[in-house]
Structure formats: structure tokens, C-alpha cells
Image: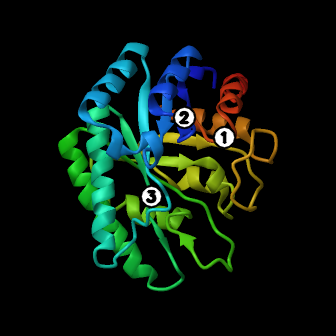
Amino acid sequence: MTDPARIGIDVGEKVPLEAAIAWAARHGVQIIDVQLDGGDNAFTRIHASRASRIRGQCERDGIRLGLHTASAVNVAEYAPLVGDAVDAYLKAYVDTAATLGAGWIVVHAGYHFSSHVTRRMEAGLDRLRRVIAYAETKNTRLLLENLNKEPPDAEVHYLAHTVEEWRWYYEKLQSPAFALSFTANHAHLVPEGVDGFLTAVPLDRVAEVRLADCFRCGKEEHLLPGQGDFDFPGLFRALEARGYQGHFTNAFGSLDDMLLARTKFAAMT
């Protein structure tokens, strides 16, 4: 992989959105991923005039903007009123993406508490269907991320963290407003590993590959490259051999850490 223009940065909530775009422009980063849940970045604080300025800033500086919902918001929620709030949260992200001109929104399947798993999966699937249908009307796209495993004795477990669970959702969700976000380090935590995911998952439906280091079958960590045992050159070779055309997103450490890693990743073969 030799084109650093395909490698984006997960800004999260590290800096205000306008500052994130300016930072990316200064450093030649063309793709950023941001979360709009708190502080000045909260989507409730992005009014029409501010959104217009941000959109113009992205267009002027050549920045492709993506949004990233919070995994703490349980897409698999079915409690009265609370489930309605999750629907409203996701719909608001779609509305905000449309006003900002964001190209995608990373979403999740939710989590369970080791009980009523099927009921929660079905609730999450229905909710994703609703928000995907809404996204179709707003010319934006949702990317369903494979999340991380939790320890076996944890009370809470993320859904769609194995190949089988992820497939259960994406095979049922067919829409031009829907694709996948493959977090490679999450795949490294489960027995099937990256190779198992790349063998099973339809790569033409993957729009983003997210990157961080960690240890094989270890715990959830977003380490800097070289601090774990993830095989980044092997990942890039496998994706290139399979014709992957999407972008990458660095998701670890500071902005400077992720910026430096772009150069290192671009040199890997």
C-alpha cells in the first residue's frame, strides 16, 4: 500500500470539528472521522449556519468527512421510551451528516447482558433497517462496524464482534445506503482472526478498514503500531490481493501519533 491519501484519522472528540478540519488540511490528511456527542461537537450545537461553514471548509480544503456514533448507545435497546431515544439519536446523526456533507456514519449493532440475546439482536436489526431507510432519503450511508470482544465473564457483550454475528446483520441489510466498516484490530481479538474475516466477508461491501495495534486473542486495546503483535504488512497485502478500494482510518493514540503512522503504513508492502 503506497497511497497515504487513502489513510484517514479518527479525530473522535479530541478537538472541535472546525479545528479538526483545519488540522487535517495543514497536514495533508484528506479523510477524518469525528464523533458528535459532546462539547462543541455535539450535533445539537451544529445549527444551520455553522453546518454551512463547516461544509464549505471541507469542500475548500478537500476533506472527506465521516461521522462515528458512540458504541455506548445501545442500538439493541428495546425498553419503552429508551428505544425511541436511540432511534432519535441515529436519525439526528443522519440529519447532521446530510447538512455537513459527511459521506458516511459508522454505526454499531449494540450490546447485550447475557440474556435476551435474540430479542436484542432483532431489536437492533429492526432499528438499523429503519435508520438505513431514512439515510436513503438523505443521500448518506451507514457503515456497520464489527466491534470488540469482551472478557468471557463480563456482564456486557458487544454484538457483531464475530464473523457469524456480523454476517447475521449485514446479510439482512441490503441497501445503497449501507456498507461495512471493518475494524481489523477487533478481528485480531477473536479466534477466526483477520484471515477468517477476510475469507468470509464480502469485501466489496467494506467501505472502511480501521487500524490499531493489539495482541492476538488479547483484550481490547488501541495501541500504537509496534506496541502489539498485529501484522499490518500482512493485512495490507491481503487487502490489495483482494482488490480492496476503500479507505483506512487510524484509531489510536494522539493526532500526531496517527499522523506519523500514515507515513509508516504507506511504506509497508
Using the image as rendered, state which of residue 58 and residue 44 is in the foreground: 44
The residue at which mark 3 appears reads as: 108
**Residue farthest toward the bottom in the current orientation of the protein:** 115
Using the image as rendered, state which of residue 191 and residue 117 is in the foreground: 117
Q: Would you place residue 172 above or below residue 20 in this image?
A: below
Looking at the figure, which quarter contains the N terminus?
Answer: top right
Label 2 SS: loop
Left or right of 116? Residue 123 is left
Can residue 19 be spotted in the picture?
Answer: yes
Q: Quadrant of residue 105?
A: top left
**Gap in Å between the C-alphas at discs 2 and 1?**
30 Å
Badge 2 amino acid: Val
Which residue is located at x 57 percent, y 75 percent? 156
The residue at which mark 2 appears reads as: 15
**Gap in Å between the C-alphas at discs 1 and 3?**
23 Å
Label 1 SS: helix
The residue at which mark 1 appears reads as: 235
Badge 3 amino acid: His
Which residue is located at x 75 percent, y 61 percent? 218
Q: Which numbered disc, 2 or 1, marks the residue closer to the eye?
A: 2
Q: Earlier in the sequence, mark 1 or mark 3?
A: 3
